[in-house]
Image (tube, rainbow, N blue to C red):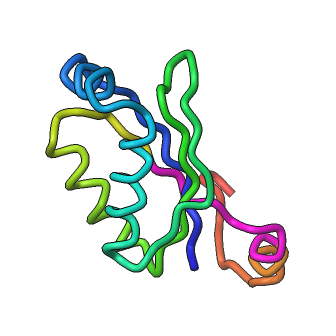
Amino acid sequence: MPKFLIQATYTPEGTKGLLKEGASSRRTAVEQAVASLGGTVETMYFAFGEHDIIVIVDFPDPVAMAAVSLRVKASGALRTQATPLLSLDEIDEATRRQVSFRPPGA
C-alpha cells in the first residue's frame, strides 16, 4: 500500500477542539478516518514548531489519501500537507527504468 507522511498544523479553531477533547481522541478520529478508506495509521506524533502533528499512514491508493485530505481541509480545523513516501526498493526499481528525456538547451 502507498505510504504517506502527513504534516498538519492546527488552526485556532482546531486548537480549541484539541484542548476540549484531548490528544487521544484526535488519534481515534484520525484512525477512524483513515480506516474508513481502507488505510492504517502507522504512527502519530504531536510536535512543536511549524507542524503540530506528524502522521505516517498507509492507504490502498493515492485517491484515498486525497479524499481524506480534502475532508480534513474542508473542516477548517487543520492545514495539512501529504508527502508520498517511497521505499528503498521502489527507488531501486525507479533507477532501473529507462526515461527518454532531453534537458533544456541540449
> Residue at position x 22%, y 33% from top?
77
Q: Residue 94's x, y, as percent?
A: 75, 76
Magenta residues, as a range?
Answer: 82-91
Q: Is residue 32 left or right of residue 77?
A: right
x then y, percent, for residue 104: 60, 53
Q: Nearer the viewer, residue 98 or 75?
A: 75
Nearer to us in this view, 35 or 78: 35
Q: Is residue 55 above or below residue 106?
A: above
- Location of residue 66 in the rendering, given as x and y in whole percent from the top left corner: 32, 63
Residue 47 occupies quadrant: top right
The mark total stands at 0
Q: Nearer the viewer, residue 25 or 5?
A: 25
Q: Is residue 16 magenta?
A: no
**Which quadrant would the N terminus be assigned to in this image?**
bottom right
Quarter of the image where one finds residue 42:
bottom right
Residue at position x 83%, y 68% from top?
A: 88
On screen, residue 41 versus residue 38, left or right, reads right
Residue at position x 78%, y 70% in the image: 91
- In the image, is residue 16 above or below residue 6? above
| The C terminus sits in image quarter | bottom right
Q: Residue at x 37, y 42 (%)?
A: 26
Q: From the top left corner, tell me how far across and down residue 73 is, in percent.
A: 23, 44
Q: Is residue 90 magenta?
A: yes
